[in-house]
Image: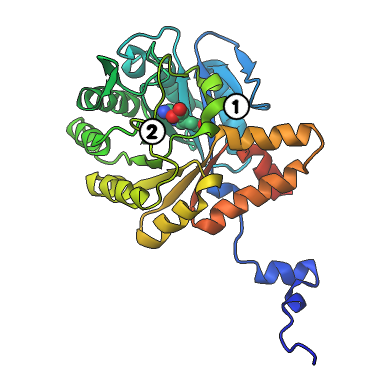
Amino acid sequence: MFPSHRPRRLRKTEIIRRMVRETSLSPDDFIYPLFVTFGKKVRKEIKSMPGCFQESVDMIVRHAREVYSLGIPSVLLFGIPEQKDEIGSGAYDPHGVVQKAIREIKNKVPELYVITDVCMCEYTSHGHCGIIESGDVKNDATLELLAKEAVSHAKAGADMVAPSDMMDGRVGAIRAALDGEGFSETPIMSYAAKYASAFYGPFREAAESTPQFGDRRSYQMDPANRREALREVALDIDEGADIVMVKPAMTYLDVISDVRENFALPVAAYNVSGEYSVIKAAAKLGWIDETRAMLEVLTSIKRAGADIILTYFAKEAAKALNK
Ligand code: PBG
């Protein structure tokens, strides 16, 4: 007997596939991460992340202009300071690399929406995301520094701050500090469900933030936990987060989907460095079609429920989509 159901009818040509497509990507979905370093005319490619660079402020501004011209609305800034110390002073220095970059970008490309990563690990000599006391990352003492860092970014002109440290209570502490300094309109995108992932490997080369001892498992989440993500997200929303993020993306699509189902806030997902590098590496070996793999990954993240995707592929994806 002939089957009466033939789903293939709607897959016959590109035009009908387009008409029934459930998920579509746009450059509007992307945030492009940038790495700001000290010096002048510096543009150093990150070995494990081909196509990504550490750049000095002058070069970042040019790059920011290119990003905006591709239709990508926003960048996320990470800083690599000239000097690191125990308490990460570079993080809240009014003349720090990120603060300078914010001012320059807002001056030269004012429409571009500038978000800053708020964390200590790029600024501390030990590479941990907070203050160390007797070999442990101290939660409450770290909150004050994170709040100072967020306020200093806002003062420099950041449009939004994004805490990525995973200390308990940091969204509330940052919200209170911003409000106290007159920045009640600056939103917070919290890295709410951030897992202790092997896929951050290449980023640590990019940001020079590898922990000098131990690892981040006492503050970042255990990859095996799904329900706990809902708890983390609920806490951050309660403390005042405006956008909640799941990170990494590819290996946590179930978590993205759960967060989308359970909360009404915009959901962001971070397609992290290792997710980028594995595709780049396989493509270089000729083992995978890079553009198709990239678009498939980004589509899957959107399909899972993300409204916003932070990705090192943003420029290449925007070019592919603008074609
Ligand atoms: C800082 C931070 C990290 C990433 C974003 N913010 C690294 C980490 O937690 O070790 C990872 C980004 C990436 O891998 O692309 N805490």
Q: Nearer the viewer, mark 1 or mark 2?
A: 2
Q: Position of residue 280 (x, y in %)?
A: 70, 34
Q: Position of residue 226 (x, y in %)?
A: 40, 51
Q: What mark, if any, has residue 63 been given in the picture?
A: 1
Query: What amino acid does circle 2 point to?
Result: Ser
Query: What amino acid does circle 1 point to?
Result: His
Q: Position of residue 199 (x, y in %)?
A: 54, 34
Label 2 beta carbon within 8 A of ligand 1: yes
The structure's colour scheme is rainbow
Of 323 and 226, nearer the camera is 226
Q: Looking at the rendering, in which quadrant would you find the N terminus?
A: bottom right
Residue drawn at point x = 57 percent, y = 18 percent? 55
Compared with 166, 125 (above or below) is above
Distance from disc 1 to disc 2, alpha carbons, whole Å, reads: 23 Å
Q: Please state if 291 lies on the left or on the right of 261 as rendered.
A: right
> Would you name the residue on which mark 2 appears?
164
Sequence order check, earlier mark of 1 and 2: 1
Q: Say which element carries label 1.
A: helix
Compared with 19, 136 (above or below) is above
Residue drawn at point x = 40 percent, y = 47 percent? 225
